[in-house]
Image (tube, helix red, strand yellow):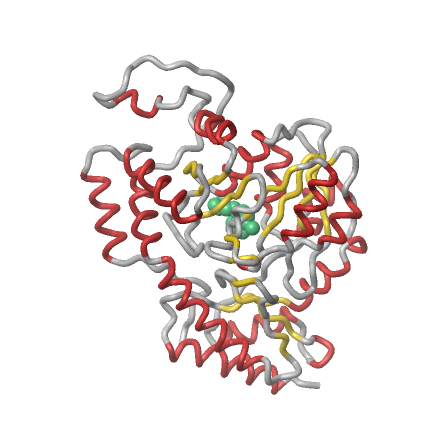
Amino acid sequence: MNIPFHVPYIDDDDIDAAVAAIKSGWTTMGPKTIAFEDAFARYVNVPNAVAVSSCTAALHLALKVCGVGSGDEVIVPANTFVATAEVVEYCGATVVFADIDKQTHCIDSASIQKELSPKTKAVIAVHYAGHPCDMDTIMDSAKAHNCYVIEDAAHSLPSYYKGKLAGTMGHCGCYSFYATKTLSTGEGGMLVTANNRWADEVRSLRLHGMNRDAWKRYDNHGSWYYDVEQQGYKYNMNDIAAAMGLTQLAKLQKLTAMRTAIAMRYSEAFGQHETLIPYSVQEMCSSSWHLYPLKLNVQALAVSRNQFIDKLAERGINTSVHFIPLYRFTYFKNRLGDSYCKFPSAEWVFEREISLPIYPAMKDEEIAYVIDNVIDIAQHYKR
Ligand SMILES: Cc1ncc(COP(=O)(O)O)c(C=O)c1O
């Protein structure tokens, strides 16, 4: 068998919607984008949802509206995708890494507390793999410190923390619709916020700083005249992506149930083996299961994490690692020096983690094949 790490779930509804958007004659940001924003705002139950070209763009604009700039510090987890940190640099501010929790791999609240300084302007909480961060503690520390919380909800559509949707608890929430995400438009993102003034600013910033309805300037309902109110960016969504977003959103619940069922099968099977550490979700939380991060009990195995990945690949099972901690990359090493020892939990997780295939299109026999082979390799190399 050959099992890819990811297969997108794009059905005829998505394809028909994208084709209809192309045939409509209006392909850039337009009525479909506005309809997707409205539907998304209703879904997350937040007054403003602003569609952008990626989650990276959403994170960047979230920092902008929070007023993050030169001289400020922003705390981000050490174990995330580079986008979470690079946006801080876009603003001329300084990235400060915090360690993660060994079980959930989310940013560790105690580590945030240690890193807070008079310069801290914001914390970016990444709901890793779909597991919500400890939002009550994070919001309390941020409030006490008078700084903002931006949720990087790239993985967590939909995940819940104490009944609240991840991405809707902080000052801004940023979602990703990248090819591998739980809702995909190929590329795309959404910024949600309860702050109407910020939402208006993001609407302007995403389109060159033009005033609000400038996207209509080529339409007979619009006007050729527009103003540029501030320096902006080319971060708008397009209507082909938005049309897919609408049809994907309509089946999100079904797709989440399919992912959850796979995760439950994995956890039940791997929980029987002392060489494997299944991923579990904390009480009062639920996960979108964007990823299934298995960990190896490396002390009990005669192979390393990397060798385990190779063994799986030899059997046609493609996996990944989430994430290479950011301080390990040349760019951040050059800026921060070697800081491995500052992040014992991120290092601990990195030594053990393998992300297994998990996507709604996975067939029963493929799920069983992954389970059987992971267990077979683990048993074969048990010390
Ligand atoms: C945690 C996290 N944040 C942000 C992003 C960036 O998302 P996008 O590709 O939509 O910019 C990703 C993408 O993989 C991610 O994993």
Quarter of the figure with the N terminus: bottom left
The answer to whether one can see residue 132 in this image is: yes
Question: Furthest-left residue in view?
Answer: 23
Residue at position x 36%, y 67% in the image? 361
Q: In this view, does 124 lie above or below 308?
A: above
Percent of width and height locating residue 210? 42, 20
Question: Furthest-front residue in view?
Answer: 163
The answer to whether one can see residue 52 in this image is: no
**Along the line of sight, which residue is nearer the eye, 283 or 268?**
283
**Along the line of sight, which residue is nearer the eye, 10 or 253?**
253
Residue at position x 57%, y 60% in the image? 131
Q: In this view, does 346 lie above or below 374?
A: above
The quadrant in which residue 127 appears is: bottom right
The quadrant in which residue 333 appears is: top right
**Along the line of sight, which residue is nearer the eye, 192 or 297?**
192
Percent of width and height locating residue 24? 19, 37
Residue at position x 59%, y 51% in the image? 126
Side (left or right) of 101 relative to 289: right
Percent of width and height locating residue 64? 58, 30
Quarter of the figure with the C terminus: bottom right
Residue at position x 64%, y 34% in the image? 89
Q: In this view, does 67 lie above or below 181?
A: above
Side (left or right) of 315 relative to 212: right
Side (left or right) of 280 relative to 290: right
Percent of width and height locating residue 168? 52, 46
